[in-house]
Image (cartoon, helix red, strand yellow):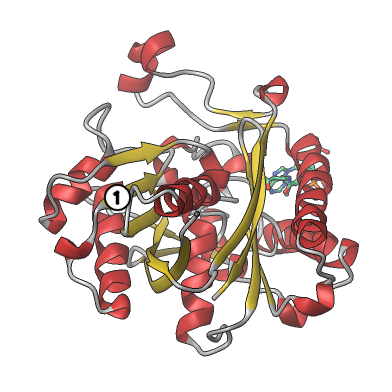
Amino acid sequence: MLIDARIIGTGSYLPKRVLDNHELAEMVDTSDDWIFSRSGIRQRHIAAPDEFTCDLALQAAERALESAQRNPEDIDLVIVATTTADQVFPSTACLLQERLGIRGGPAFDVQAVCAGFVYALDVAHRYIQTGGSKCALVIGAETFSRILNWKDRSTCVLFGDGAGAMVIEASDSPGIISSHLHADGAYKDLLCVPTGISTAYDQVLQREAFTEMKGKEVFRWAVSALGDAVVEALEANNLTEKDIDWLVPHQANIRIIQAIARRVDMSLDKVVVTIERHGNTSAASVPLAFDEAVRDGRIRRGQNIIFEAFGGGFAWGSMLVKY
Ligand code: COA
């Protein structure tokens, strides 16, 4: 018999430094008007030079534990979704585990770029379902600003740093209901950092490992794949959009979010949108948005929520959750 899992607490963290579009326009040839009209972004948070992904993850994790009323010793599984790990190894999850004073249970990173959090939540859910974990900490954390070319206006205006966390626990009633994950590596060149440890470590050391993107193609693909993934989550559970209280989408572009809401006939009033203030925080974007809406009282216990996310790979997916 599979064991159900519920989200029992959430937390998030944004670095203090805010970089708005006007300040960016002094760095590259762009404008607040261009960025806002094309993406819906007004500002993003940027980690301090001595602030790393694990620092962001720690803050979000502590807040999630507090809201779950659980102690670090209750956690028997730590998964961090990140593209921007502190070190080549150990994993950011192991670094975080040590800082939280958790010992012994499995801890590992998941790399699915902007889809990382839904992948990580799916893995944690499966651990709990099969009895491998009773209480898991799942985090999306990124210092994406470190892999941006701050001279490339077509990418640097879109991303930001942040972290979001959830505590997931075995439960008598269903919380995480279904997940629908996909990937297609045939599209690896449309959104990537083309260099890395094994291929061109010298470029990484020279801080020349930057995000590259064919924006128009990524846009078209994201709209179509995410629309399909949301429909898949509805159909798999015999639900319609009327049964869903909130869509918590990956925050990449307001126009992508609007297109998906239109595709499933969902009013934007039922969509959690943070992109204007956060930009695209990659693996952190879904748990950050979810935590904000839980804390401000929009998302309430018993409601049906759909998460969706899309990113480099391509890797994407959706999940249906009863909060
Ligand atoms: N400021 C001003 N001009 C810019 C610019 C900027 N920051 N970035 C690019 N441009 C210019 C380009 O050089 C290009 O100029 P050209 O036509 O003279 O060559 C032009 O703007 C492109 O404009 P447009 O075709 O209207 O852009 P767009 O509508 O495709 O919007 C994106 C561009 C990047 C916002 C959009 O394609 C997008 O959001 N794609 C998906 C990105 C994404 O979400 N990625 C992450 C997924 S996880």
Which residue is painted at 42% across and 19% down in the image?
Answer: 196
Quickly name the residue at label 1.
78
Looking at the rendering, which quadrant does residue 276 occupy? bottom right
Which residue is painted at 41% across and 43% down in the image?
Answer: 82
Position of 307 with respect to 70 (left or right) is right
Q: Is residue 36 above or below residue 88?
A: below
In front of the other: 259 or 234: 234
In front of the other: 314 or 204: 314
Kind of residue indicated by mark 1: Val
Q: Crowding at label 1, few (<14), some or many (≥20) Cα neighbours within 10 Å? A: many
Looking at the rendering, which quadrant does residue 219 occupy? top right
Point out residue 286 in the picture as x, y percentages from the top left corner: 54, 61
Point out residue 304 in the picture as x, y percentages from the top left corner: 65, 75
Residue 30 visible in rendering? no
In front of the other: 109 or 301: 301
Position of 202 with respect to 118 (left or right) is left
Position of 126 with respect to 251 (left or right) is left
